[in-house]
Image: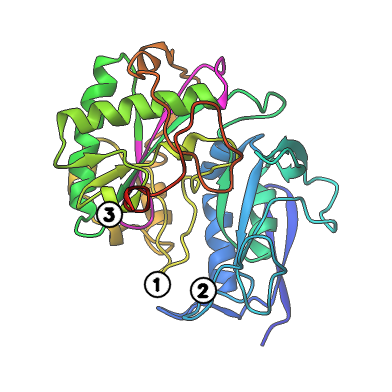
Amino acid sequence: MAKETFLEVAGREVRVSNPDKVYFPEPGYTKLDVVSYYATVAPFMLPYLMDRPTALERWPDGVHPGVKMAQRGRRVGPGEAFYQKRVPSHAPDWIKSHEISFPSGRTADEITPTEQAVIVWCANLGTIVFHPWAVTAPDVEHPDELRLDLDPQPGTDFHDAIAAAEVLRGILDELGMQGWPKTSGGRGLHVFVPIEPRWDFIDVRHAAIGIGREMARRAPELVTVEWWKENRGERIFLDYNQNARDRTIASAFSVRPRPLAPVSTPLTWDEVPETEPGDWTIATVPQRLAEVGDVHADRWGQAFDLTPALELYDGEEMAYPPDYPKMPGEPKRVQPSRARD
């Protein structure tokens, strides 16, 4: 069993330790398979991470049955996966970072990728998923992306998310905005809208709420923005809180920690209705890129005015995630059934 190997990545030599370690027992992908995948897609992935503070979702022992994510606020146990939100102390000097602040007021220096080798170096740490913020350094207070996460609830599936995406696409067209869709790597879809970095996190979150409410108004049996799960029903949840500070969505071309190593993959709108969740994995995405390249390459340099989306927001605040401090105008954080009791 090899103890290490090396990959050449855009002029840098990156060490891969324990390359034969099994990372995905189904279908048997090794650590080297995963790191090599990231080396292959790095030229296409880097624009999505460039200068963005990025949290690393690390699975250093692989994605095996029974391996769980470490609970927030306690020490990581043996074999657990975890989120790394601070640049590792042993990072080489070519790994850049930038300070960001969390809702609690704490700060941290997060990795901000600036070259392809950073992606591969992080993959060697056991990073399966890259979670970039919706901001770029040095201005980390004004998002340049509106992120619309279509999350299937129990009783719904990927095809319901496709139907919801078509409703969303129509609304964006009316607002004079364009969204770029990608698979989540699971059962959902993500639609990213590049925006001018003129608004803060609260504004961008309000724009997502406004769009979500409009979707629910047009397709009430299909879409919901209800924060409490007991009120969502069998509908697609537009997760507006993915636009709150410190909330992130898996980057394009990120592997997801599920059997077969699925990949969050950019699609054209014409491809969305024909796609199945299992189509895109570390085995199929490199070939797709070799054939058609990145189908979202035309989004770079585009930035839309958020004002039309903000005009859909009616001023009624909605719940934040439970780890946030109480926010101005926010309703009580009590699920409706308990409030009634």
**In the rendered image of this protein, does residue 33 appear above or below residue 235?**
below
Measured in 3D between alpha carbons, the distance from the residue under mark 2 to the one under mark 1, in whole angstroms, is 8 Å
Report how far apart the C-alphas of labels 2 and 3 lie in the structure: 24 Å
Farthest bottom residue in view: 1
Residue at 14%, 41% in the rendered image: 221
Name the amino acid, label 2.
Val
Residue kind at label 1, given as amino acid type:
Pro
Mark closest to the chain's N terminus, 1 or 3: 3
What SS does tag 3 mark?
Answer: loop
Residue displayed at 22% across by 33% down? 216
Q: Nearer the viewer, mark 2 or mark 3?
A: 3
Residue at 49%, 39% in the rendered image: 320
Q: Which residues are magenta?
A: 181-201
Residue that numbered label 2 is attached to: 63
The x, y position of residue 294, in whole percent, is: 42, 39
Residue 271 visible at all: no
Disc on res. 153: 3
- What's the amino acid at mark 3? Gln
The residue to which callout 1 is attached is 259
